[in-house]
Image (tube, rainbow, N blue to C red):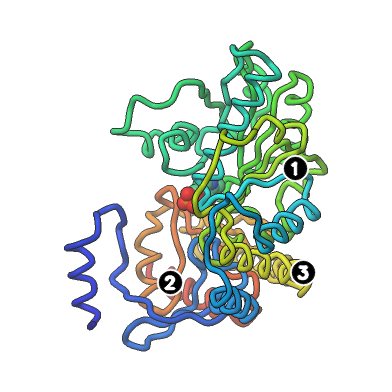
């Protein structure tokens, strides 16, 4: 099919839930993607923090190809080795003792909400069911997860929402503590707010949340759907804080583009789920299992985290230089390769012009440019991106 034909047919047949750029992408390799006309783009979106190892990663391809010819899917009524090995990799390399597999970030958070309610029901009594979440958070698009998401724009038109959620400002421990009531069973938050505009809390914030949760005997749930799998320079962003949560959710980069989600918990909390409480037909099937297994092994073994930290620092320093040159940049911030530039103009224009110059970036919250490139990028890739940004901002 031709480019124009694909766009027209897509608009005719696919529901209008995405504002799409007029580009048809056909191929990817490393940090590059190509459109249907053979035009090359430097991809600093990476499927929104999904393709952390870059496109067409050889180990992921090999693992999926081999498994595809052996066994693609069986029900979770049976044991499979790929899911088992993946669970072991995740528990060996995190605070968690047990994993539940699903297919997306929203589903992982949905599972976390259900597990925290079930745990509270059994261990704290039936009146404790309320979760405190953060303003400007993002936890997904199902009914429970838009309720957990502290942004009205995602909830508008979909009321009534779920009972049992309250919201407090992010990075504010006093506000959190004063929102705790006799109904509270847990707190759910992102270690860095992604969709909320790459908001990085104070260094001691997560430890403060943990301390409050301990004092009130409530659960701490971290949503690492975006920050997880090396994005910030550690396998999981909570590791920076020196504390351990009770529950963690993962998805996005877990299988580098193959759909999978996971909800991890300590044994103590995980015990609240018994057969029949929760399930997912596709969750952690053999294909997703080997893809994610290959990802975790590669991230841990092959200098990916070091590269993320090294190039992340370099990228941030180059963004700071750009800020000195262009008054439209109000602030730059980031951790590892999760970076942002806050502008005093609409970010959408910059994003569009970067696309025309062969650089894919993304914006959140109206005036924030977000950079979540593959963790395998080089200083050269950063230089190319900075050059495009510089040119685009020159004429603003
Ligand atoms: C993307 C995201 C989600 C939702 O993930 P889906 O796979 O789109 O359902 C949830 N939480 C965070 C922090 C995210 O960034």
**Residue placed under numbered mark 2 in the picture:** 394
Note whether ligand 1 is within 8 Å of mark 1.
no
Which quadrant of the view contains residue 132?
top right
Residue occupying image coordinates x 35% and y 67%: 352
Residue 230 location, x and y as percent?
69, 61
Tell me if I can see residue 322 in this picture: no
Residue occupying image coordinates x 71% and y 54%: 87
Mark toward the viewer: 3 or 1:
3
**Residue placed under numbered mark 1 in the picture:** 203
Q: Which numbered circle lies on residue 306?
A: 3
Q: Residue furthest bottom?
A: 38
Mark toward the viewer: 2 or 1:
1
- Marks 3/1 in contact by CB < 8 Å: the verdict is no
Q: Residue furthest front?
A: 78
- Residue situated in front as seen by the camera: 68 or 316: 68
Of the two numbered discs 3 and 1 on the same chain, state the one appearing first in sequence. Answer: 1
Taking 303 as reference, is 280 left or right? left
Tell me if I can see residue 395 in this picture: yes
Secondary structure at numbered mark 2: helix
């Amino acid at each position: 099919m031709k480019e124009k034909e694909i766009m027209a047919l897509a608009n005719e047949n696919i529901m209008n839930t995405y504002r799409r750029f007029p580009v048809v992408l056909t191929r990817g390799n490393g940090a590059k993607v190509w459109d249907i006309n053979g035009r090359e783009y430097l991809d600093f979106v990476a499927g929104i923090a999904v393709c952390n190892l870059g496109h067409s990663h050889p180990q992921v391809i090999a693992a999926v190809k081999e498994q595809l010819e052996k066994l693609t899917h069986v029900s979770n009524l049976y044991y499979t080795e790929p899911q088992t090995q993946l669970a072991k990799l995740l528990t060996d390399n995190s605070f968690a003792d047990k994993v539940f597999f699903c297919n997306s970030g929203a589903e992982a958070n949905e599972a976390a909400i259900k597990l925290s309610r079930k745990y509270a029901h059994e261990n704290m009594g039936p009146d404790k069911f309320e979760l405190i979440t953060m303003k400007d958070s993002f936890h997904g698009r199902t009914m429970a997860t838009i309720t957990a998401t502290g942004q009205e724009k995602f909830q508008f038109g979909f009321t009534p929402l779920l009972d049992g959620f309250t919201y407090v400002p992010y990075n504010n421990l006093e506000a959190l503590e004063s929102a705790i009531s006799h109904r509270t069973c847990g707190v759910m938050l992102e270690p860095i707010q992604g969709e909320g505009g790459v908001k990085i809390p104070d260094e001691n914030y997560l430890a403060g949340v943990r301390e409050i949760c301990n004092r009130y005997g409530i659960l701490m749930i971290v949503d690492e759907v975006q920050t997880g799998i090396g994005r910030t320079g550690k396998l999981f962003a909570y590791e920076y804080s020196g504390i351990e949560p009770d529950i963690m959710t993962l998805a996005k980069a877990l299988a580098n583009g193959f759909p999978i989600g996971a909800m991890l918990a300590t044994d103590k909390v995980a015990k609240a789920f018994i057969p029949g409480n929760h399930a997912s037909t596709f969750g952690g099937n053999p294909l997703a299992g080997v893809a994610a297994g290959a990802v975790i092994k590669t991230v841990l073994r092959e200098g990916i985290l070091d590269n993320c930290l090294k190039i992340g620092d370099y990228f941030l320093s180059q963004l700071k230089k750009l800020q000195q040159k262009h008054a439209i940049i109000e602030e730059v911030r980031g951790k590892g390769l999760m970076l942002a530039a806050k502008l005093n103009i609409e970010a959408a224009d910059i994003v569009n012009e970067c696309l025309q110059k062969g650089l894919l970036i993304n914006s959140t919250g109206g005036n924030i440019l977000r950079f979540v490139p593959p963790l395998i990028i080089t200083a050269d890739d950063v230089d190319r991106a900075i050059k495009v940004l510089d040119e685009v901002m020159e004429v603003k």
